[in-house]
Image (tube, grey):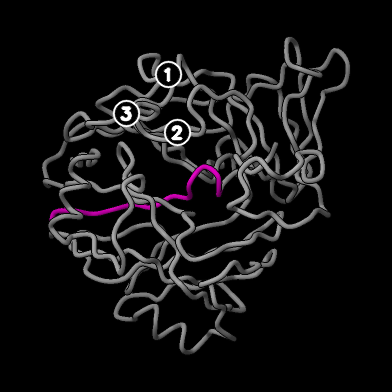
Amino acid sequence: MSLIWPYQRILGAIEAGQVACDRAVEPDQVQPASLDLRLGGRAFRLPASFLPGPGRSVADRLAELSTHEVDLSRPTVLERNCVHIIPLAEGLRLPRHVEARANPKSSSGRLDIFVRVIVDGGATFDDVPAGYHGPLYAEVVPRSFPVLAVAGARLAQLRFRDIDGNPGTGPRLVPVTVDLDPAGKPGGIVGYRARRTSGLVDMAGIGTHPRDAFWEALVPRRGRRELVLDPDEFYILASAEAVVVEPYEAAEMVAYDTAVGELRSHYAGFLDPGFGLAAAGGAGSRIVLEVRSHDVPFLLDHGQRVATLEYESLSERPHHLYGEGLRSNYQGQGLKLSKQFS
């Protein structure tokens, strides 16, 4: 059985040196049940993604595969569909009973930036084995838009778990369905599709990018509550359910579930305790779905299941909840693009 660390346990790990940083952790990096990870000062361009595999370090593979190095000490363009491996400012010295898992931050997912964390000796993405001592790296691939990034930008987050080896109840699974009903929505808009040609997104430019220059609003045909997803196009949709994550739990979205179709329904999967909670300013929050269909056009109907939420227990209630005393851009949200768009 594993229990997720809350805010105060993460702070304690930083103070104890279990999170090793080349510069001081900023207070708002620590979230109710996760830690934001910062880009380091350089990036490596590669022709392809990779995993180092057992017994091999990421640095060794970069020395073999990297085509050139990119300076992130000043704002730098990361081009679409180019693979970048970026050493992170944070490394880990985990106790042997502690493991971690990474996920993109919400804004990364909504910008269609493919972000995965890799570790030395790693055979899977986003998983940090128990007892790991070493650096962390982010694989960053902008898909829909070129982005302007700089050292210190936060594209991924990390969640820590105690593992005690005792069997216990598994995650609580909750299905998620899609909202494609135009009734009552401004302009009947049920979603957005990324435009094939657009400008550069400055990740630090909050609310400075005109929505219509980057996104096409989607309105179903009159009398219909359905949408055809074109292969490899990127869509922003919303769940039909208003979700609540209670103070003693955290949730993660299963990103890819072939049982519900050949599509990926979510790229940024963590929901912190307090998400959607009325006492924390939520009163129920919709989940924004970052959707990409594969191989063939796919017809989505209103209310169709598209994903699954996994709820897990925390070791204790966090001192802060999502939306409560911490900056939370998406509390109480409905259909919402990333914070960079006006």
Question: Which residue shows up at 81% across the image and 44% down it?
Answer: 213
Q: Between marks 3 and 2, how big is the CA–CA gap?
A: 10 Å
Q: Is residue 107 magenta?
A: yes
- Residue under numbered circle 2: 328
Residue 50: image tag: none
Disc 3 packing (10 Å; few <14; some 14–19; many ≥20):
many
Q: Position of residue 246 (x, y in %)?
A: 32, 22
Residue ID at (23%, 32%)? 318
The residue wearing badge 3 is 321
Is 293 left or right of 297, judged from the image as shown? left
Q: Of marks 2 and 1, which one's residue comes earlier in the chain?
A: 1
SS under mark 3? loop
What's the distance in space between the residues labelled 3 and 1, CA to CA? 10 Å
Tag 1 residue:
281
Task: Classify 290 as above or below 304.
Answer: below
Name the residue at 58% across, 32% down: 288
> The residue tagged with tag 2: helix, strand or loop?
loop
Q: Is residue 91 left or right of residue 342?
A: left
Identify the image quadrant of residue 185: top right
Label 1 residue SS: loop
Residue type at mark 1?
Answer: Gly
Q: Percent x, y for residue 262?
A: 64, 44
User: Is tag 3's residue or tag 1's residue first in the polypeptide sequence?
Assistant: 1
Magenta-highlighted residues:
97-108
Q: Pick the residue in front: 99 or 200.
A: 200
Given residues 106 and 254, the one toward you in this image is 106
Q: Residue furthest top?
A: 184
Q: How many marks?
A: 3
> What crowding class fits label 1: few (fewer than 14 Cα within 10 Å), some (14-19), or many (20 or more)?
some
Q: Check contact, mark 2 vs mark 1: CB within 8 A.
A: yes
Provide residue 332's location: percent of width, then percent of height: 50, 22
